Amino acid sequence: MKRSLIILIAIVAILIGGGVLLMATLRSAPLKDVATTQTTQDLPVMAPAIMPSATAPLALTASSSTSTAPIEAPVGTTSTVAANVSTTATSSSGYGAVGHSIDAVGIAPSEAVVGSGQSLTFTALISDPAVITSSVNIILIKANGFPAILGTLSPNGDGVFTLVTSAHALSLPAGNLDLRISVAFSGALKRVQSGDFPLSIIPAANTSAWMLVSPGGLFTMKLPPELSVAEYPFPAYATRDFHIQLSDGTMLAAIYVFSPQQWTNAQQTDGEVPIILTSSSTGGFVYGYIVSENDGNELGFNEGELRADLVQSLATFEAN
């Protein structure tokens, strides 16, 4: 009995000693840091996912159309540039915005008589090479803000576009009209419009009592009693030169009779360029005029009334 007890105690002591030795061994062995090992590996870096931006422009596909130019849109939905200055407007195009410009616009004269056949010349200077040359339109801004296309300007070279027409041909109503030039550019989704420029269409005066003149048999026109026409004997750059003047010789305007080549040369002068009146199909002449800068006269005529009468006289001009 005593021997069995001694054996049991010895077994227990051996077990306890082994357990202590095992614990000491475990405590002395280093632990493997799994997390640290994984983060020190050269793993490929994942690029962040790029989500489409709600404000980013989207690519648009042009629809099939027989027209090469965008359709005229109501005023307010197109980019505009100021008239007579070199300015850049922005038009949407594909993924981004592309700047296009109309350098200058104008009309001569800026006043005409309703229903008259007197020539109106619309001009636009567009040096932007992306211009669609068949898209340069002159538009009338209606009272409701919508544009009405009056005609299309033709390219004349060096970025100059012109249209010669008349108040009669355009059926323009009397009143102060707001006009714009509207242009399409290659690759642009919107047309570019110039700023407004005015055209005054005035009612026709009663000229039944005015004198009908036909100087040199080249043309006819009606003049009020205070005005007359006289030929200037030394024309500078035209075939014939006529002055519309008061009785004291104060000149209000000069009317020039050009050959086609003289007219072309006159458009390239550095000075004041004549405004076209009309052309003759029989004589082959081009008629132009320049309004004098004379301010006032010694006869006491009201300057405003003289200018108004001159506009009415020019409206009666007809080439022979």
Image (cartoon, helix red, strand yellow):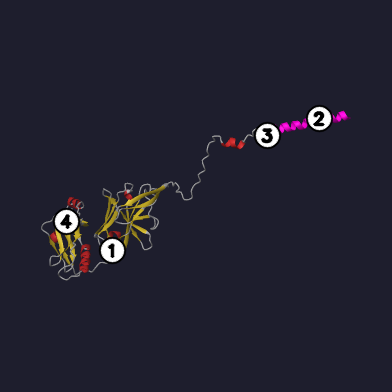
Secondary element at tag 4: strand
Between the C-alphas of marks 1 and 2, the distance is 129 Å
Residue under pointer 2: 10
Relative to 157, is 1 on the left or the right? Answer: right
Q: Nearer the viewer, mark 4 or mark 2?
A: 2
Q: Position of residue 47 (x, y in %)?
A: 51, 40
* Magenta span: 1-27
Front one among 244 and 224: 244
Give the amino acid type for the residue marked by disc 1 in the picture: Ser
Q: Is residue 300 magenta?
A: no
Earlier along the polypeptide chain: callout 4 or callout 3? 3
Earlier along the polypeptide chain: callout 1 or callout 2? 2
Earlier along the polypeptide chain: callout 4 or callout 2? 2
Residue under pointer 3: 27
Between the C-alphas of marks 3 and 2, the distance is 26 Å
Point 85% across, 31% down: residue: 5
Q: Is residue 207 visible?
A: no
The reply to whether the C-beta atoms of the residues labelled 1 and 2 are less than 8 Å apart is no
Residue under pointer 4: 257
Which mark identifies residue 291? none
Secondary element at tag 3: helix
Between the C-alphas of marks 1 and 3, the distance is 105 Å
Q: Residue furthest right?
A: 1
Front one among 139 and 22: 22
The reply to whether the C-beta atoms of the residues labelled 1 and 3 are less than 8 Å apart is no
Which mark identifies residue 200? 1
Q: Residues within 10 Å of mark 1 (few under 14, many from 20)?
A: some
Give the amino acid type for the residue marked by disc 4 in the picture: Val
Point 21% across, 69% down: residue: 305
Secondary element at tag 1: strand
